[in-house]
Amino acid sequence: MTTDQKRPEEADWLNLRIIGHAIDSSPITRPILYVIILAALAALFDATESFLMGFALPGVAKEFELRPEMMGSFGAAYMYGNFMGSIGWGWIADKCGRKVAFTVTILCFSILSGLCGLATGVIFLVSLRFAIGVFLGGAVPVDAAILSEFSPARIRGYANGMLPITWPLATMLTSVIAMLILPNYGWRGLFVVGCLPAFLLFWVLRWVPESPRWLVNQGRFKEARRALRQIEIDDAALERSREATKNERPAPKLPSGRFRDLFAGGQTVKTVHVWLLWLLAQMAAVGMSFWMPQLFVRIAGLSIHEAVGYMFYIAFFTGAGRLTVVLLSEKVGRKPFIVLGFCGAALPLLSLIWASEPTELFWSFAFFGFFGDMGMCAATIYVPEVFPMRIRTLGISTAMGIGRIGGGTGSALIGIFLGAGMATELWVYLAGACLIAGILTIFLGIESKGKSLEELNEQAAPAGK
């Protein structure tokens, strides 16, 4: 243990409440902006990787002569790997730090994505997709934790909203890449793009410090002060925050998070709600994003190049849904958008029962994208805010991990339904999942807009503590 870890006066002078106040009252400094931009870029490449397999799927299916049931295994393997990774890397991030987990996950999934282009068989490719899912499943919740812990409360909704807004941008980016690469290099060439996130590491190592909130909770006070200085919060700002919070109840050093803490005191309802929310919503959202290009090919008889063109324009609708939340979530709140988004997404899914022409599919997919992505964007902002500091990454990762199970199950079941000729039952099943997610939020969700993370932590604390 270092000297600064033993000094009680250091612990009294620097605690979670003081750091929270200092960050929340800080101007948007250039280093804070760099952290937000790098986290958003990492999310953009993460999302691009998620879409690559969907655009490659028609070519993969043709080369390996796959039935719909087998096609779904690629999405399922990837999402089940996501589940394992989000649980494991969430624990690592809470134990070893956000920056360590962030760096390792980006490096590993980038390398594995490039290897997909060398796949010689279905089993090898499915195994690689599972391994990519393990590392990518850790990158996303750690990304969300970094943004929540570095962003002042007044812009936290906007900053966290940058993560889900990268998904429609990734759809556009992947569509353009697919239009350029598929005609000349085939599906294997697409996976070379998956290596690009590795180039982010130089800037991550230089500009992203370890979370000062996490460092203080570990008793590493000098390192926390260095991290704060790196984002231009000096000792004078900390002293002002200490004065401003001196009459408030001191924030104790929190113990390391344990799985059972997800169900301690008032946290139980929040945990159950976000688990069910992500499980049900991701069944439809991930399943559809994975299968959409193939559905254009299978139902409307389009070529993959024509399907890619439609996907590019659908991204404008998904982007509009997410941008609406990013711009208005600090005024309207998170909860109304979660409810409106998922309940609204059920209607275009049901309309697919009667859709068979390319334009009919396009409009159903477009409106599903608008409302579904509205709900997912609001849920992504909401989840980091309902878990206390000591279990934030664990809470985010378990919720998103369970969502990965839903996404993997949705991907597999879409293939099974289509292979069995049960299209009507498929759309009813997906619409029902979205509708239940919205209704549960009406009764179990809270409103977190405008509240500091420390206020939300206190709401989650057991009575009497």
Image (cartoon, rainbow, N blue to C red):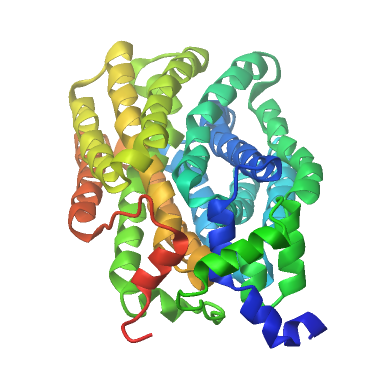
- Residue at 69 percent across and 14 percent down: it is 184
**Quadrant (top left, top right, bottom left, bottom right) of the N terminus:** bottom right
Q: Residue 402 appears in which quarter of the rendering?
A: bottom left
Residue 281 picture location, percent across and down: 33, 47
Q: Is residue 16 found left or right of 32 in the rendered image?
A: left
Q: Is residue 325 found left or right of 256 in the rendered image?
A: left
Residue 415 in sight here: no
Q: Tally the numbered discs.
A: 0
Q: Is residue 264 found left or right of 202 in the rendered image?
A: left
- Residue at 38 percent across and 15 percent down: it is 301
Residue 284 picture location, percent across and down: 33, 42
**Quadrant (top left, top right, bottom left, bottom right) of the C terminus:** bottom left
Q: Is residue 370 above or below residue 438?
A: above
- Residue at 34 percent across and 81 percent down: it is 462
Q: Is residue 196 found left or right of 424 in the rendered image?
A: right
- Residue at 55 percent across and 50 percent down: it is 151
Depth check: give the residue in front, 282 or 128.
Answer: 282
Depth check: give the residue in front, 73 or 396.
Answer: 396
Residue 138 picture location, percent across and down: 59, 57
